[in-house]
């Protein structure tokens, strides 16, 4: 996967979370990433009851751990942790954060 995809998505999520945290209203942004052949949709945003780590409240929002990544020649995009806590397991396609909470480091 290209560094460009990671940079664009990380930048988009940063802008999204900074702007939304001030508004205190739920918000979801959808990112469609492609390698020219296949595409993947990732969602990020805020929601009441969401947590940083995976849990029952997050599952109700559609935030579930993805299976391990496939072979390196298969296009794969997912939100993962950068802080070493591995609260997102193998990664997620939907990443929701609590309302009013600041930005977290994230990588696609």
Image (cartoon, rainbow, N blue to C red):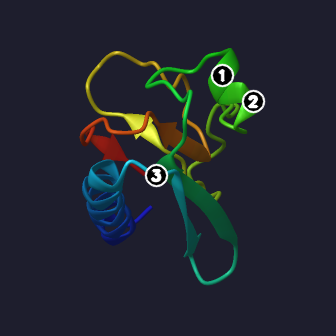
Residue designated by label 2: 60
Q: Are marks 1 and 3 in contact (CB under 8 Å)?
A: no
Locate residue 20: give its quadrant: bottom left
Q: How many marks?
A: 3
Instruction: Judge depth for marks 2 and 3 and give the one in front.
Output: 3
Residue designated by label 3: 25
Instruction: Judge depth for marks 1 and 3 and give the one in front.
Output: 3
Indicate whether 57 appears above or below 94: above
Q: Helix, strand or loop at disc 1?
A: helix
**The label number, if any, that marks residue 57 in the structure image:** 1
Q: Between marks 2 and 3, how big is the CA–CA gap?
A: 18 Å
> Which residue is rendered at x = 26% and y = 40% of the image?
105
> Which residue is rendered at x = 60% and y = 84% of the image?
36
Q: Helix, strand or loop at disc 3?
A: loop
Expressed as whole percent of the image width and height from the top left, the position of residue 28 reads 55, 58
Whether residue 86 sits left or right of residue 30 in the image: it is: left
Indicate whether 10 appears above or below 96: below
> Which residue is rendered at x = 33% and y = 70% of the image?
8
Expressed as whole percent of the image width and height from the top left, the position of residue 21 reads 31, 48
Q: Nearer the viewer, residue 42 or 29?
A: 29
Q: Nearer the viewer, residue 44 or 19?
A: 19
Q: Are marks 2 and 1 in contact (CB under 8 Å)?
A: yes
Expressed as whole percent of the image width and height from the top left, the position of residue 85 reads 34, 15
In terms of sequence position, does the residue under pointer 1 or pointer 3 come before the other?
3
Q: Residues within 10 Å of mark 1 (few under 14, many from 20)?
A: some
- Residue furthest front in the image: 24
């Amino acid at each position: 996967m290209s560094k460009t995809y990671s940079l664009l998505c990380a930048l988009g999520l940063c802008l999204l979370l900074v702007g939304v945290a001030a508004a205190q209203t739920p918000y979801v942004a959808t990112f469609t990433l492609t390698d020219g052949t296949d595409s993947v949709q990732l969602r990020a945003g805020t929601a009441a009851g969401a947590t940083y780590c995976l849990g029952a409240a997050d599952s109700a929002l559609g935030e579930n751990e993805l299976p391990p990544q496939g072979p390196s020649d298969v296009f794969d995009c997912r939100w993962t942790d950068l802080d070493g806590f591995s609260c997102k397991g193998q990664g997620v396609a939907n990443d929701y954060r609590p309302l009013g909470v600041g930005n977290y480091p994230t990588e696609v």
